Image: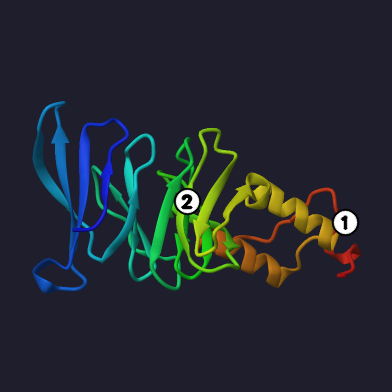
Amino acid sequence: MGRLVWSNAGDTLLVALNHLDDDLNSSEILRFKFDGQALTEIDPLPAGAPIYSMQLPLDDRSLAIGTAGGAVILVPLAGPQTHPIAAHDGAVTSLSWTPDGTRLFSGGADGSVKVWDYDPDGKNKLTLAITLRHDTGSVYASVVPPDGAGVYTAGDSPRVFYWPKTRYSIGAILDRAKKMINRNMFGPEWVRYAESNLGEPRAYEKTFGDLPDLSQSQPR
């Protein structure tokens, strides 16, 4: 038996089971409905990979699963699961949602914290926003405060780390980039930036509207 998670509504208990029939890659999530007095088992959810961590957002729509192999999988409680997303070089040891359900944080044994933007209606439901680095070793726990203004993480270090929103929001990242380079992106930079964020080719656009065109800009 692996992890246990209660739905935020308090009416469902989820239990992760790994190594079914001695198959190291076989796992499933048992579901139990709770009526206030007793638990009643309902149809399980297949997972397809060893489960190391899991977490539900406040709306209980999609269960986020972190696998022992480093992938993140979204399993809607009603509907097909997403394909595994390669996230960490090692087990995904912690998962935390923001209160509004628009962002997921994954912590890994590789010492990184991944920040994912979540769009339930998008082609790519999870999009990597940024990777934060724990220089003190593995990440074992993470939690988002009720105001959603940052994330706290803990791991091998005896310290608890706080990552404010200004460290990982797209607006803050672009503002820092703008101050550092004082120019728009060149073509190859734009291709790498746009395709890594959207997963599909896009026409070139100026990165910052108030900075000069590339023909008038000098790289620094």
Q: Which residue position is annotated with label 2?
A: 142
Q: Which residue position is annotated with label 1?
A: 212
Disc 2 residue crowd, few under 14, some 14–19, many 20+, Cα 10 Å: many
Element type where label 2 sits in the image: strand
Name the residue: 25% across, 66% down.
Answer: 49
Q: Position of residue 181 (x, y in %)?
A: 83, 63
**In the picture shown, does residue 76 fall above or below 145?**
below
Quarter in which the N terminus is drawn: bottom left
Element type where label 1 sits in the image: loop
Spatial CA span between label 2 and label 1: 41 Å
Name the residue: 26% across, 66% down.
Answer: 50
Q: Amino acid at mark 1?
A: Pro
Disc 1 residue crowd, few under 14, some 14–19, many 20+, Cα 10 Å: some
The picture quadrant where one finds residue 52 is bottom left
Q: Position of residue 200 (x, y in %)?
A: 52, 62
Figure label count: 2
